[in-house]
Amino acid sequence: MASVTASVGRAALVLCRQTAPKRSLVLPLAFKPKRQFAPFSHASRLKQNELPEVPEYSPDLLDATERIQYDAMAPDQRETFDREFTTLAQTLRDQGLGQTMNEIHKEAAPFIGWTGGNEDVEDYFNDDIHRLHSEPYMEDGITTMAYDELEQHRELREYARIAAWEMPLLSNHVKPFTLPEETHILRFRYTTYMGETHPAETKVVVEFCSKDLVPNYLTEEQRITLLKLVGPRYNPAQDLIRMSTENYPTRAQNKRYLGDLVETLIKEAKEGDSFADIPLDLRHHKPKPKLNFPVGWAMTEERKQQLREKQQEKMRLAEAKRDAITDGNEVVQKAINSIPALNPALRLNPGQENAEKQPVPVRARSAPTPWKPFSGRR
């Protein structure tokens, strides 16, 4: 039946298809007709012999594609199709729908162009175009980067005005801090990006403690069932259930969705299966060890005195180790001064220290040639 409906919609255009008279939209402004037209009225009917009649329905009026679909119909569907379109063609002829469409085309024909024949609008735009073409460009326009710089400067000035004139008024709305009431269990969190539009602005996060629901809303057994339902969204270290959503385009819709979701979970924990035979799975939570500052590292007066004594003991041990180290240069010097084989002066007899020294022949090279400046010849 869907194919019949589609064919009916396409074939209806065949019966109403009228060829409108062609007209040129490009005309000089000086030759545009200046006529006053009365609004369209059904009272001013055209002559019936000037309008084409809506033809009788026939399958031959269908185009090739529609004809293929028509031939593919079942006999009963084809009979229904022919009956409906015969009635439609008769209705169009009785109501004169083709005549009405031709009247609309003829009434709208003189309105040439998008101005609709309004001379004031045409003169305004013609004068503006003439001015742009007549005045030469002086190359004094501002660049795109300069426009961006100007826009940034305006934005900074706007925030400066807010800080100077509006922020001091916020002190009039100061309220003393009070603890939230016991009925305010859900805590919603939003994210705002100042000065820009961000797709994450619609995200809403809700969190609440499971123990706050006991005993006003749930019993202890029902609370355990609720923890089994939320699964990895439960943090056992802080006893927090955290959920978030950004499926909807506004914050209000996301907040409403989270509120309904929490209400549904509480209702399911009360009325649904308790899952008593299934243990609470906390494998998703990886506990992190909390490292505390050692008490012995605190810098008290006793600790400072202990560190000073320890430092002095280290210095004393280092000094003793330094004294136990043998100096090789000193040992060599002592050996030279005491061993005759290393010192020839020790082999002389007493009284021969001032004996005449014997000359020793030494081979020497000839004196080097004195340096002369280069004269350009070799």
Image (spheres, grey):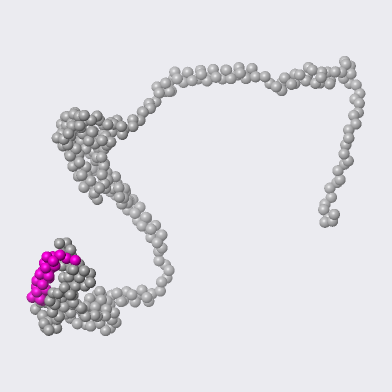
Based on the picture, tell me whether residue 87 belongs to the magenta stretch: yes
**In percent of the image, x 26 and y 84: which residue is there?**
31
Instruction: State the predominant SS element of the stretch in magenta.
Output: helix
Tally the numbered discs. Answer: 0
View extreme (top): residue = 350
Which residues lie in the magenta part?
A: 72-96
Q: Is residue 94 above or below residue 295?
A: below
Towards the viewer: 230 or 355: 230
Q: Residue 230 vs residue 133: left or right?
A: left
**In percent of the image, x 30 and y 50: which residue is there?**
199
Quadrant of residue 337 in the image?
top right
- On the question of residue 177 being in view, the answer is no
- On the question of residue 302 being in view, the answer is yes
Q: x, y percentage for residue 24?
A: 26, 80
Quadrant of residue 346 in the image?
top right
Question: Dividing the image into 4 quarters, which one contains the C terminus?
Answer: bottom right
Question: Dividing the image into 4 quarters, which one contains the N terminus?
Answer: bottom left
Q: x, y percentage for residue 249?
A: 24, 50
Q: x, y percentage for residue 272?
A: 16, 35
View extreme (front): residue = 75
Q: x, y percentage for residue 333?
A: 75, 21
Q: Is residue 103 above or below residue 363?
A: below
Q: Is residue 50 above or below residue 210?
A: below
Q: Residue 195 vs residue 97: left or right?
A: right
Towards the viewer: 74 or 29: 74
**In percent of the image, x 20 and y 32: which residue is there?**
275
